[in-house]
Image (tube, rainbow, N blue to C red):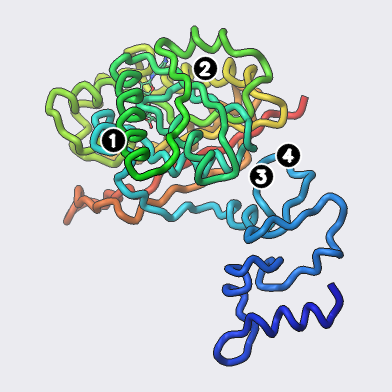
Amino acid sequence: MDDGDRHRQSRLVTDDDGAFDAERAQEESLPIEDGEVIDTSELADHQCYVEGRGVYDERNRVNDLTGREWKYATKSVIDEGYPPDVQHDLRSEHGGQKPPRLCAELIGRFSKAGDTVLDPFAGVGGTLLGASFCEHEGTGLREAIGFERNERWVDLYEEVLERENEERRARGEPPLAEQELQCGDCADLIDGIEDDSVDLLLTDVPYWHMDELEQTRNEHETRESKLGAFDGDDEEEADTSANGDGSGTKAEWLEDMAAKFDRFADAVTPEGHVVVFIGDMYREQSYEFLSAELARAIESTAPLTLAANLVWYDPTKDLHVYGYPFSFVPSMVHQNVLVFRLEDE
Ligand SMILES: C[S@@+](CC[C@H](N)C(=O)[O-])C[C@H]1O[C@@H](n2cnc3c(N)ncnc32)[C@H](O)[C@@H]1O
């Protein structure tokens, strides 16, 4: 494109004041990046222009994002309240479920189309559904494998997928791909995964007293999520606690998680990522900085290095008043997302 062409393109997309209208240019799929019309003939051999998305660098080994999308994806805060969709009522029976579209967003940041994603603590399948969303609302389908030891959640994932796909078909939309959710203990099932075969491990770890909270929730048949939140009224229930193996202190839970991630790391490709949701908690009048403690425990045991702590801030979360007017107890409206990469050998 010579200067004349560039000028003509700019003139075509001016706003009412005659200035260059980048938004309109983007809508009309002109090659623009950061508001500038790109001279595509000047792109390097490893660069190509992706219509409406910007310049993609073919050397990108992390994801399928263009430069502009990559820049946005490095934002350390994900400021998004995801709507209660994808059979939310069914999935909320779990209580610790994650929004599938948030999982899809993270999968898009840390994997490429066709990659393999593993969730060893899959619950009702937020990660698996997210991997399937990538086919229709991202850069392409990822194959996802999940492990979940509670059969109830495995059955629920299948029901969610079936109902969601019925609704999608009725709306004329293509169905979400079914992913593989294996029922059993991740400590055993991981042996069925080949070394260096997983590009992204995305998971949401069980808390050291999670089983007990789940049980309480089920008994009370309440949909209020208490997991991972600062819930003053959790304290009594949380006292005796249960980690992945049904018992234990926080130290034991950390040790158990670190050992599990050490084993999981074998399955991850050298260029892969391990991404872990973890909320901090408030117990017995003190802040449990679980995200920091878990990161340190994993780093000191597994061959993984912490690359980032992203914060998922959910602006739709209700604020609760626990300590008023005597003591400051924060209302947790965020969760941490620890991002690890494999240590260089
Ligand atoms: C925080 S939840 C995950 C929720 C999930 N992100 C979702 O969207 O539904 C953690 C899950 O790990 C499961 N779990 C705990 N220990 C496990 C183990 N050793 N093997 C497999 N699953 C386990 C629990 O039953 C629980 O459903």
From the image, tell me which residue sits under label 2.
260
Q: In the rendered view, tell whether residue 248 sits above or below residue 171.
A: above
Q: Secondary structure at mark 3?
A: loop
Contact, mark 1 vs mark 4 (Cβ under 8 Å): no
Task: Say which of 247 and 137 sits in front.
Answer: 137
Name the front one of labels 2 and 3.
Answer: 3
Residue 283 — which label?
Answer: 1
Q: In the rendered view, tell whether residue 173 sits above or below residue 160.
A: below
From the image, tell me which residue sits under label 4.
61
User: Mark 3 packing: few (<14 Cα in 10 Å), some, or many (20+)?
Assistant: many
Where does residue 310 sit, x and y in percent of width and height? 52, 46
Label 4 to label 2, Cα distance in Å? 26 Å
Q: Earlier in the sequence, mark 2 or mark 3?
A: 3
> Would you say 83 lies left or right of 254 here?
left
Q: Earlier in the sequence, mark 4 or mark 2?
A: 4
Q: In the rendered view, tell whether residue 148 sits above or below residue 65.
A: above
